[in-house]
Image (cartoon, grey):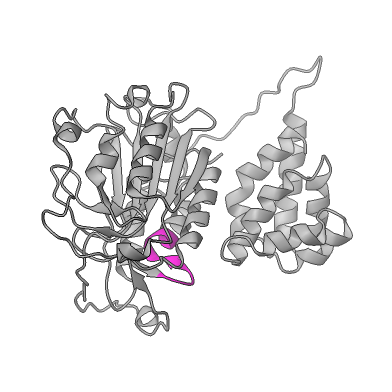
Amino acid sequence: MEEADRQLLRRSRVQLVSELQVVPLWDALLNRELFTPDMIEDIQRAGSGSRRDQARQLIIDLETRGSQALPLFISCLEDTGQDVLASFLRTSRQSAKLLKPTPGNPTPVVLRPKTPSPVDTGSGGFSDVCAPKTLKGNADLAYVLNADPCGHCLIINNVNFCPDSGHSTRTGSNIDCEKLRRRFSLLHFAVEVKCDLTAKKMVLALVELARRDHSALDCCVVVILSHGCQASHLQFPGAVYGTDGCPVSIERIVNIFNGTGCPSLGGKPKLFFIQACGGGQKDHGFEVASTSLEDRASGSNPETDATPFQEGSGTIDQPDAVSSLPTPSDIFVSYSTFPGFVSWRDPKSGSWYVETLDSIFEQWAPSEDLQSLLLRVANAVSEKGIYKQMPGCFNFLRKKLFFKTQ
C-alpha cells in the first residue's frame, strides 16, 4: 500500500472502527480477492470478536494488502451500501493526491478558515479537538511524544498460578491483555507481553526494561494484570502477585524506573496501569437515583483479584529500594480499584477496568489528555454492577499527556 493511503487509513481509523459494518463486507472482500478465507476468519476471531474488534483488525490488516488495497476497499464499501464512509475515503484520497507535490510543482498553499476557540462543554472536555493540538505544540504545557514508536510498553499478564500459591486462575485476563496490546500498539508503542511470571521474574523483566536505552523515546508504559493485595508502603499502595504466590509491591515496581535505575527516562512520563485487587473489601456502594438497572440485572458472575493482606508477610520493601528515592516526578500510576477493595473481572469479557479503559481510549484519546481519559474511566466503572468499584490514580506528572493517535 502506498504511504499516503496508509497514512489516510491511520488518520481515519477511529471513524472507521466506530462506523464500519463488517458483516456485509466479508463476501465483497473475498470477491475482490482483498483477503483469503483464512485471513477473514482470523479477523473475525480478533479480540473478543465484537464488531469493533473485527473492524479494528480489518483496518490494520488492510495496510498489508498491496498498492490497490484502499481503492478496492472503497469499492467494497460502495457495494455494501456504506456510501458515507466510501465517499469520505475517496474524497480524502483524492485531496491528498492533489496536494502531493510533484517535480516542478511546489507544494500548493492551502488557505484554511480561522480555527475556532475551544468551548468548554462542562463535561470535562472541549467541543473542538483543536484544544489538545494547541497544548501539544507547547512543550511547557504538554509532554512531547514525537518519537515513533513513542516508547516501550511492557504487559505482564499473570493468569495461571502455582497450586501452592493459593490463587485461582484469572480467567478472562487474556482478553484484557489482547485489548491492551492492540490499544497501545495503536498509540504507537512497541508492545511486549510476558505471561505467567513468578515474582522474581517480574522484577527481572522490569529491571531489564528500565536498563534499556530510552534516549530516543518519549515515554514508557508498564501494565500489570494479576492478583493483588494491600501492602505496607511509603508512597504507592498495594502489591501484585507473581505466579508463585509471592508479592511485589507497586512501590518497588515504580521505583525500578526512578532516576537512578533508569536515567534515560529522566524527565519523560512513566505510566503504570495496575489491574489487580487492592485488598479484600467488597464495596456495596450507596443508593443514588441514577443506579443502572442494566448492571444490577446483569447475569454475569464476575470474579475478584483479591488476596487478604497479612501484616509482616514480606510485602514491606527492602530498605535499599526506598532509602534514596528522588522526588517522584513524571510518574503516573493508575489503579483499577481503591486501595483495600476488590477489582472485578468477568471471565467472558475481561475486567471492568480494562474493558472500560480500552473503550474510552478508543473514543477520546485523540482529543483528551491522560487524566481526563481516566476520569471518564473512573466514572464509567463506578456505575457498574451490584458490588461497586472505584478506579483511581497517583499523578506526579508535570505536564498534560496526550497520546500519539496519528
- Position above or below: 98 against 383: above
Q: Quadrant of residue 4?
A: top right
Residue 257: horizontal and vertical position, in percent? Answer: 31, 32
State the extent of the magenta-drawn residues as a range. Answer: 346-356
- Which residue is at a point 37% across and 78% down the rendered structure image? 295
Q: Residue at x 50, y 42 (%)?
A: 192
Q: Nearer the viewer, residue 43 or 111?
A: 43
Residue 377 among those drawn in magenta: no
- Residue positioned 49% across, 28% down in the render: 146
Labels in figure, total: 0
Residue 117 visible to the viewer: no
For the point 74% across and 52% down, the residue is: 87
Is 295 or 291 nearer to us in this picture? 295
Relative to residue 222, is residue 247 drawn left or right? left
Q: Quadrant of residue 331?
A: top left
Up/down of 144 relative to 391, above or below: above
Q: Where does residue 216 sit, x and y in percent of width and height?
A: 47, 22
354 falls in the magenta region: yes
Quadrant of the drawing holding the C terminus: top right
Farthest residue toward the top? 104
Residue farthest toward the front in the current orientation of the protein:
164
